[in-house]
Amino acid sequence: MLTQLSLFWFDLLRDVIPNHVLPAADFPPELAAYRAQLDGRSMLCQKTKPLPIECVVRGYLSGSGWKDYRATGKVCGISLPAGLRESERLPEAIFTPSTKATAGHDENISFDEAVARIGGVLGELVRAVSLEIYKRAAAYAEPRGIILADTKFEFGLAGDQLIWIDEALTPDSSRFWPADGYQPGRAQPSFDKQYVRDYLERIGWNKQPPGPEIPPEVVEATRARYLEAYRQLTGHELM
């Protein structure tokens, strides 16, 4: 489902920025024997040099952004109006990059820290592109019953060209909320992996490896939410 939804968004928003997906016709002959297993579950992609940051855009105040705001009145160094509630829509979407941790958890950083890692010109470009993708995707999703609260993008370089890579606007990289139940001032029901996070919070997991076994009923309930998000966004069932 994540692969198919990513392909959907990469195709829908390909005019914003090139992405790393190559035509299926270029499928390597040496993998032909595995075609049945790989169809629908894989993407043939252009190799790039990934940027060492994750590009997060937030249109609503939730998750780590909400915690940051309650403590400082800011999110990743960006000052926000006083008195905002949890899950409230922001006056405008904000770009809040994070580290790309090889172990442990990613950490939110300021735009200046992102520039220190990738340079000013590239920093301005990924900010502008990230905000445009978010704006377009959110406008597409909302009339289809889904609020795109926030999302994470990754980019890479192919020579000097910036390429959109990894996944695109999936429940694993985004917060999807049902629009018909949206009510600021509280946490929202969601179509994303927040359901798993909530389960782990309830059992008191200390967020240290190894992770606990996830019960089948939690897996199935999460899968059902993912499939519903896919159906509402694409307009058809997952084949």
Image: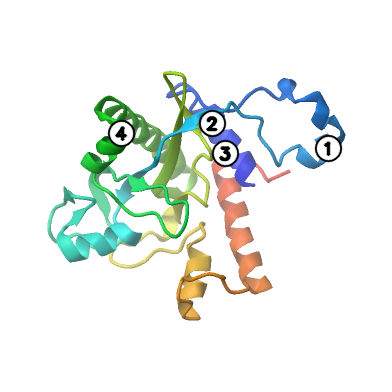
Query: Contact (CB < 8 A) between labels 2 and 4?
Result: no
Can residue 235 be seen here? The reply is: no
Circle 4 sits in a helix, a strand or a loop, which is it? Answer: helix
At x 46% / y 71%, what residue is drawn?
Answer: 207
Badge 2 density bin: few <14, some 14–19, many ≥20, Cα 10 Å? many
Say which label, 4 or 3, has the lower sequence index: 3
Badge 3 density bin: few <14, some 14–19, many ≥20, Cα 10 Å? some
Q: CA distance from mark 2 to mark 3?
A: 6 Å
Say which label, 1 or 2, has the lower sequence index: 2
Q: CA distance from mark 4 to mark 3?
A: 20 Å
Query: Contact (CB < 8 A) between labels 2 and 3?
Result: yes
Q: Which mark is residue 127?
A: 4
The vertical placement of 84 against 12, above or below, is below
Which residue is identified by label 2?
Answer: 10
Say which label, 4 or 1, has the lower sequence index: 1
Amino acid bearing label 2: Phe
Which residue is identified by label 1?
Answer: 34
What percent of the width, then of the height, locates residue 35?
82, 35
Asked whether 104 or 2 is in front, the reply is 104
What percent of the width, then of the height, locates residue 66?
28, 61
